[in-house]
Amino acid sequence: TGGYLVIYEFPSAAQAGAIGRDFRAYLAAGTGAIQYPRDTQFVLRRVGTTLVFFAWSLEASTDERVPEVAAALSTVGEPLTPG
């Protein structure tokens, strides 16, 4: 109940990076943002050919340790910026 962790695997690191940047831009846009509670924070990282996505809301979570999970996931791989 603390958040959702999703792992996406792609054929290449370049494809993972391109799709990850598009996904990051989508989450920042109005269309993507309305699908989550207002205080939702996102972790989106690329590890080789893999994207790691974690969406969490402190208000909606029943687990107060969720920020620790997000902080740990933020150290994995590399961040993706909109593109």
Image (spheres, rainbow, N blue to C red):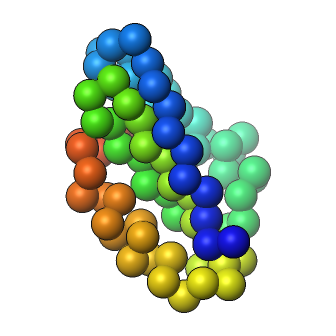
Total labels drawn: 0
Q: Residue at x 55, y 53 (%)?
A: 5
Say above or below: 50 vs 53. above
Q: Is residue 57 above or below residue 25?
A: below
Q: Residue at x 49, y 47 (%)?
A: 53
Eyeballing the image, is 49 above or below 37?
Answer: above
Write the residue at 32% across / 36% down.
Answer: 46
Quarter that holds the C terminus: top left
Residue drawn at (50%, 39%), measured in percent from left and top? 7
The answer, for residue 82, to whether it is visible in the render is no
Q: On the rendered structure, is 24 left or right of 48?
A: right
Q: Does residue 27 appear to the left or right of 22 in the view shown?
A: right
State the quadrant of the N terminus.
bottom right
Residue 21 horizontal/vertical position (percent):
41, 30
The residue lying furthest to the right in this view is 35
Q: Could you tell me if residue 4 is visible in this image?
A: yes
The image quadrant of residue 81 is: top left
- State the image coordinates of residue 64 (x, y, percent, origin top left): 54, 88
Nearer to me, 28 or 65: 65
Q: Residue 50 appears at what percent x and percent y?
A: 38, 30
- Viewer-closest of 17 and 83: 17
Q: Residue furthest bottom?
A: 64
The image quarter containing residue 45 is top left
**Height in image: 7 above or below 73?**
above
